Image (cartoon, rainbow, N blue to C red):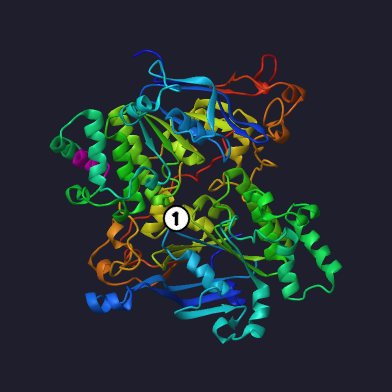
Amino acid sequence: MSGPMTESAAVAEPFLRVSGLARYFDVSPPLLNRLLERRERLWLRAVDGVEFSIRSGETFALVGESGCGKSTVARLIVGLYKPTRGRIEVDGVDLAMVRGRAAEKPLRRRVQMIFQDPYASLNPRWRVRDIIAEPIRTHRLRAGETQVRARVDELLEQVKLAPADGGKYPHEFSGGQRQRISIARALATEPEFLVCDEPTSALDVSVQAQILNLMKELQRRLGLTLLFISHNLAVVSYMADRVGVMYLGRLVEVADVATLFTAPGHPYTRMLLDTIPDLSMSGHARQPVGGEVPNPIEPPPGCAFHPRCPFADARCRSERPEPHLQGSTLVACHGIEERRLPEALRPAPIRAIPEE
Amino acid sequence: MSGPLLAVEHLRIEFPTRRGILTAVDDLSFQIAEGEVLGVVGESGAGKSLTGAAIIGLLEPPGRIAGGQILFAGRRIDNLGREEMRRLRGKQIGAIFQDPLTSLNPLYTVGRQITETIEVHLGLDAAAARRRALDLMAEVGIPAPEQRIDHYPHQFSGGMRQRVVIALALAANPRLIIADEPTTALDVSIQAQIIALLKRLCREHRTAVMLVTHDMGVIAETADRVAVMYAGRLAELGPVRAVVKQPRHPYTVGLMGAIPAIGGPRHRLAQIDGAMPRLGTIPSGCAFHTRCPSAFEHCLRERPDLLPAGASAAACWLYAEGRA
């Protein structure tokens, strides 16, 4: 699919637009401690100024390691958190302008979420058919119980389960099957947009393949737009059209999937790609970068990645880089803007399937 | 020393339940040579963690070894008493688990835990043990060991804690380390660091490793040979390069195909329909036959032996004499 993101190509209004999005959590010590020990208020900047858009029908992936803020972004978009700052527009509607349950309802129908933990996201005391029927009933999408049941059966079949499974309880199913149930529930309102937060991270590899295949098929058939959150780059390379790389609450790079994997720009992206195991056994020596993700309560000044970056200079240590367009890629890096980084040489695409 | 360092022979692990006996590991045999890294890979329920637990004598009741034997340096260890097993563990066989807090006592400083292992197993005095602990911490890449040696586990990040666990596992210079999902809980960039560290240290100390994981990528990077487990049995065993690039057992083929490949086709991942059978519902004959695209009538009747297949060995009737 991919092509350069020119102005004319982006003429159609994006389905989702996020600008200057930030979410801080107050992790201050209790008031008494602050007074007695003279301690400051502490803020965890989970998301610290993020900007991206997603076109209708596209799969946009957010990738990064723990503490990067990708799950918080997902929850902000779905309305589980309110932003500290910034704007979220769904199909042109500014979420901040939507107040009250009556106004929120249509939006809730159109945007649904799938969670990582298949054991925590289904009410263990409800039968599967009631779990899936709940959104249908809430939004009055079918008239009468017979219609509701018929729709539940249809959804179960769509995720390759049987209508008879509707009568069972979640604990009777495996992790992969529970994720199918979660997907069926998410599709119950005929949404246009699915936010998937690490939907296969808790699943075995072979089960993951089944679920990813299912998601791709459903996306094609139902014309869904996907925001796909993952720490697994191989999964992202399979699912995404465009990819946003996050580090400590900020977006460091946004590129189409082919470009990201063959010509990564940001030093953190390069480092991340270097952590992908080489299943082609090419013997290509990997260079694991040292250091760890810093504490998000006390991020480094300037560019958050500078302590681990082989190219950091004085400007990087003091001035936070803003994203700028480099070809069709958006990247936040002084070194790239100043053209002092070498081209990233990626070896030939890594293949897991054995050569014939 | 001739012969393998570790030999697992016809191991059988059972769980007695009210509804009968469940066999979690069924007639498993493999060996690990001195200094070798054997990867044991499989999905959830394959029995790989139980195997590791059985080897170091940490199998939780009601699970029990119901058959076969485990030999370490030619000596039987599956029937040792608790005290003897405790001496063996730490001195000869070290362990690294997924959650560092399984191995680290939160109430003692990291230094105290490492030095205790050294004093008990190497018989050094307190000062010498502390010096060795500092050396170990530096070796595993913990910055400022002189300060951090007196810190508690909760004062370390996840990746640093795992480094401490590696230091602890190596402290008494064991000949074998059982590592069960040592990097699964860590960020990918830290995973890469820890794997590189483990590889280097084990090579330098000539320590053999049994690396248990579901992650084929970790195996490809670290192991010399790999054992693929399915439903409590061995499906394939061979040099890592052979198993990863030219898998023989249909299950291994399916597993490798299910891993998304960067630059690979994007319309569909190879998928194995169904799921690994639960204990108590394992099919007759070959445990994989119900999901196997190449199953034929022999597979339903008789459980396959481990047969030579190219550079590896596969428990699959496709490789019997007279078949392609």
* Residue A176 sits above or below residue B130 on the image: below
**Residue B92 placed where, x, y %?**
33, 26
Q: Residue furthest left?
A: B127
Image position of A223 (left or right of A70):
right
Image position of A141 (left or right of B104):
right
Q: Nearer the viewer, residue A194 or B95?
A: B95
Kindly report the secondary structure that dominates the magenta region of the rendered protein. helix
Q: Is residue B159 magenta?
A: no
Q: Quadrant of residue B16?
A: top right
**Residue B265 placed where, x, y %?**
61, 47
Q: Quadrant of residue A150?
A: bottom right
Q: Given the image, on which type of amino acid does mark 1 rest?
A: Ala
Answer few, some or many: residues within 10 Å of disc 1's Cα (few below 14, many 20 plus, some between 14 and 19). Answer: some
Q: Is residue B138 magenta?
A: yes
Q: Nearer the viewer, residue B197 or B183?
A: B183
Seen at 49% across and 29% down, the residue is: B226
* Residue A334 sits above or below residue B61 on the image: below
Q: Which residue is mark 1?
A: A263
